[in-house]
Amino acid sequence: MKKPLVNGKQGLLWQLLLAAVFFCFGLLLMTQYYTNIDRTNSLTEESPENLAQIMRSAVDANDALNVEYAQLQSELAQLESAIASGDTLQDTMSATIDSLKAATGWDEVNGEGVLVTITNVSNLYYWDLIDIANELFNAGAEAVAINSVRLTIHTQITERRKVEQIEDEATGEITGQRESIIHVVGGEELQPPYRIRAIGDAATLETALNMPGGVLEPLTTIYGANVTVQRMANLNIPAAVIPAYHYATVPETTTE
Amino acid sequence: MWLPLLGLVVGLLLGSLLTLSIPIVYANYLAIAVLAGLDSLLGGWRAALEREFDGPVLISGFFVNAIVAALLAFLGDKVGLDLYLAAVIAFGIRIFKNIGAVRRAMINNHREQKRRSLARRAEQALEETGAEQ
């Protein structure tokens, strides 16, 4: 009844075959193991109650996410509008507007600069004032005012002849007439002393004005005017009177 | 003796390295095939212990049982009968029977070995006493 196990060459062959069978079995077992992991992770094996529960929680989570999404969306819209109307655009816009205001004389401006005071103006011509203003702008002045008149592209610097009747004090008769020249800036007659204020780099402006053979030298040496140039840490230059524009329009395409 | 165990270990390692898996709908059939294979191997072990090991029987049993069990479960699904359960029960019972037989065979073998060694020792003792006389 009891046969011995096969031994020898044939025994080895059978052992190899058995090993192959065991190998197949191990492979099958592991395959089933991983398949079962897949199955337990999938929803097909869940009971209807569990599925309902899972679905309800999924729906709840979805609702919560939708609410969060809407909140974030509105937040985004707020931020976008804030950016559009605020920060960057407004910054650039206000910077542009500020420089335009400074350039056009729309608003009063403050800053460091020089104050040129001219007394004894009787021998001055109006183009001396133009020369001074040109020199100041040339030297980088950003705003210039002569007395209280801000210089803009509309400002005219000219002169007006004034004829005064000379009366005899005793009799009241007109004995003659005296002609005088009044400097006019922007329609206003200047009263001495002339104070020319310029905002810009004070050192540069001062150097430009005091250059040997420059704009001021002939006034003092030839015309006997008394000119002083002072550096000012803080100057105030008033706003200009800007005329209303009726004919000039800005093409819309250039605003881009 | 160690070669089949080595085959089993290599199969398990390879299976876990490859992490093979089949579509979930076929999971039941593979499970029943694994059960049938386990039953065949235990039957083979039992046969080996009882000195009745037959290679062709084991190998054919392993594959045919596994395939037929899977096919039976598949057929049961198609006709609406849980033949799958029948296979589980049948193979389950057989597995336990085989394990019982393996256990008994091991104990018997152990006892026989003990008896034989006792007998050999008794013979030796008899021979020694005979020599002395």
Image (cartoon, helix red, strand yellow):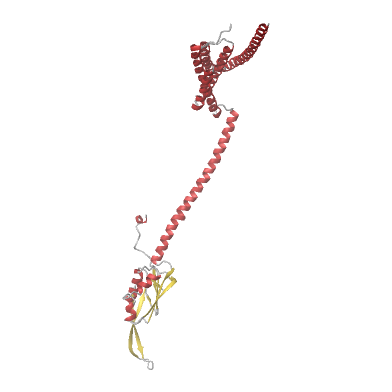
Instruction: For the N terminus of chain B, give its image quadrant.
Output: top right
Quadrant of residue A117 within the rendered picture: bottom left
Q: Is residue A21 above or below residue A94?
A: above
Classify residue A164 as left or right of residue B66.
left
Q: Is residue B25 above or below residue A116?
A: above
Q: Residue at x 57, y 37 (%)?
A: A60
Q: Residue A23's spot in the image, x, y percent?
A: 51, 20
Query: Outermost residue toward the bottom?
Result: A170
| Coordinates of residue A135 in the picture (x, y in percent) | 34, 71
Q: State the residue in front, A10 or A140.
A: A10
- Answer with left or right where residue A24 lies relative to residue A182: right
- Closer to the camera, A186 or A123? A123
**A39, above or below A223, in the image:** above
Q: Between residue A229 and residue A235, name the one nearer to us.
A: A229
Q: Tell me where residue A87 appears, x and y as whole percent.
A: 46, 55
Q: Position of residue A188 (x, y in %)?
A: 38, 75
In the foreground, A99 or B20: B20
- Would you say residue B21 is visible in this rendering? no
Residue A13 shows in the view:
yes
Quarter of the picture containing the C terminus of chain B is top right
- What is the count of numbered marks? 0
Based on the displayed image, in which of its 4 quarters is residue A58 positioned? Answer: top right
